[in-house]
């Protein structure tokens, strides 16, 4: 079974721009969660989608948004990028039962 | 407020010996705990988990112990191998199967296994 895939793997943007990251979960998994990893704050939960609905949201500003499609693929969008948004963005999938989440390799976003 | 804490940023162990990684939590609503291993430039890899109704779970060289009264869990790796060198994250979640799930992570412990 293929794992979680994320595209692109690396991205460089400038302040004020917006960015869209993509995640394809493990086949059959209906839940997709997004996390941000930074050296200062560690791994922090952004949001979770299940059956195209946002089920849970972390403590991030409204500039961070996401969506999920009918095939369970998910995208997250960050608008009006700030320098502090530079991070590794990780997507995780879960079959919808149980608590184990399986992570993709991440997208490294650098904001200049 | 850090709800999941890993107080040791690093740990060095000789190959073949036991590695013990510790984790404390403050939120008594957490009922499921997980350990992940992470190499640089990769996503975390799930290692082992434990439900709050248990106090021990084993999987090969990895054993997780949970002490609910102390709000403490530990990961034991026996025997330690150089390939185990990585950052280990403790994570916690709450809720039942089928409900929204969110992992709260500790800050990680860098384990180095010396040959």
Image (tube, coloured by chain):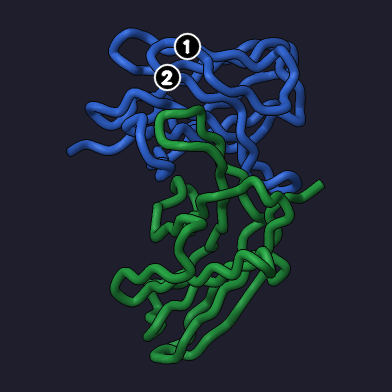
- Mark 1 lies on a secondary structure that is strand
Q: Quadrant of residue A93?
A: top left
**Residue sticking out furthest to the left:** A1
Please give the chain letter of the residue carrying mark 1.
A
State the residue position of label 1.
A53
Mark 2 lies on a secondary structure that is strand
Looking at the image, can residue B37 be seen? no
* Chain letter for the blue colouring in the rendering: A
Q: Which chain is green?
A: B
Question: Where in the figure is residue A48, as x and y percent of width and height?
Answer: 51, 24
Residue at screen point 64% across, 46% down: B29
Q: Against A23, is B51 above or below?
A: below
| Residue located 51% across and 57% down the image | B52
Question: Residue at (68%, 51%) from the top-left corner?
Answer: B28
Q: Measuring 37% from the left and 9% from the top, which residue is drawn there?
A: A69
Residue A28 or residue A105, whichever sits in front: A28
Decide if residue B60 is on the left or right side of residue B13.
left
Q: Which mark identifies residue A26?
A: none
Name the residue that disc number 2 marks. Answer: A50
- Estimate the x, y position of residue A60 in percent, counting from the top left: 72, 24
């Amino acid at each position: 079974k293929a794992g979680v895939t994320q595209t692109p793997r690396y991205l460089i943007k400038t302040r004020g721009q917006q960015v869209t990251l993509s995640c394809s979960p493990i086949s059959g998994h209906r839940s997709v969660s997004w996390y941000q990893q930074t050296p200062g704050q560690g791994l922090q939960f952004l949001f979770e989608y299940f059956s195209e609905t946002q089920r849970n949201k972390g403590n991030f500003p409204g500039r961070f948004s996401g969506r999920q499609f009918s095939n369970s693929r998910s995208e997250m969008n960050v608008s009006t990028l700030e320098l502090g948004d530079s991070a590794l963005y990780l997507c995780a999938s879960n079959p919808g039962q149980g608590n184990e989440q399986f992570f993709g390799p991440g997208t490294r976003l650098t904001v200049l | 407020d850090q709800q999941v804490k890993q107080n040791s940023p690093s740990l060095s162990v000789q190959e073949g010996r036991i590695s013990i990684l510790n984790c404390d939590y403050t939120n008594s609503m957490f009922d499921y705990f997980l350990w992940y291993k992470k190499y640089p430039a990769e996503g975390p890899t799930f290692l082992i988990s434990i439900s709050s109704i248990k106090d021990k779970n084993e999987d090969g060289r990895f054993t997780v112990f949970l002490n609910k009264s102390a709000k403490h869990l530990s990961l034991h790796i026996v025997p330690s191998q150089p390939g185990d060198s990585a950052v280990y994250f403790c994570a916690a979640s709450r809720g039942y199967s089928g409900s929204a799930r969110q992992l709260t992570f500790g800050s990680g412990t860098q384990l180095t296994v010396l040959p």
